[in-house]
Image (spheres, helix red, strand yellow):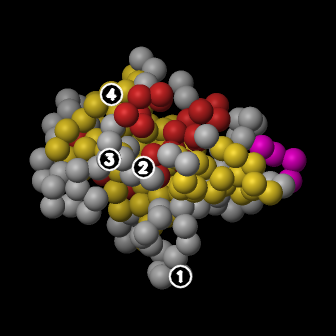
Amino acid sequence: MFVRTLPGVQAVLFGGSIVGMAVFPEGRNRSESRAPRVSGGAFPVLASSAARVRRGVIGILSRNSEYLLIKRAPGVPKGGCWCFPGGHVERNETPRKAVRRELLEELGIQVEPTIRLGSVRVHDSRHILVVWKVDHVAGVFRLAEKEIADIAWLPLDGIFSMQPGLASNAVVVEMLRRGHAK
């Protein structure tokens, strides 16, 4: 849920704690349908970091009003946590190409990015993640067991029932609720 804290600034609350912030340009608020953008628009931030930033992507897959979450495998950072699928952007790779590659590597499926929903700066790391809504265009799900322990399809309201979950889930769910959930 978003709570207005200052004019043009809203905080994302989860479990009574602030887990992220979105800064909206003058005259805009969460009820308007345009997605946040890194430059010239809202930018959800989950804490700040002065270290060098690393780029990543999140791919939002939906079917029948449900969204795909993955459970990170033991041995990877944040192992055991539920989150949306995605990963790092490689050197000389665009975020659009990265989301295609990551979902192919992790899930065995080919996807096509359709809508760029915004970006999230991740708490306790140096990552900025570009969030894409993607369509499943080919392939059968085949999990990369070294990276993914399980998957689940859930409605938006069921995503927070999967615990432990990454704090970035709250910001992504709010992006979807702002008019991009289809």
Distance Cα–Cα, label 2 vs label 1: 22 Å
**Residue 58, labelled with which disc?**
2
- Foreground mark, 4 or 3, reads 3
Q: Which residue is farthest front?
A: 16
Q: Dominant secondary structure of the magenta stretch?
A: loop
**Residue 153, labelled with which disc?**
4
Distance Cα–Cα, label 1 vs label 4: 36 Å
**Residue 50, labelled with which disc?**
1
Distance Cα–Cα, label 4 vs label 3: 16 Å
Q: Earlier in the sequence, mark 3 or mark 2?
A: 2
Is mark 4 in CB contact (under 8 Å) with mark 3?
no
Using a 10 Å C-alpha cutoff, classify the residue at mark 2 as few (fewer than 14 neighbours), some (14 to 19) or many (20 or more): many
Is mark 4 in CB contact (under 8 Å) with mark 2?
no
Specify the amino acid type for callout 2.
Answer: Ile
Q: Which residues are magenta?
A: 25-29
Residue 105 shows in this picture: no
Using a 10 Å C-alpha cutoff, classify the residue at mark 1 as few (fewer than 14 neighbours), some (14 to 19) or many (20 or more): few
**Residue 164, labelled with which disc?**
3
Q: Residue 39: where, in percent of width, then height?
A: 69, 62
- Foreground mark, 4 or 2, reads 4
Specify the amino acid type for callout 3.
Answer: Pro
Quarter-of-image position of residue 60: top left
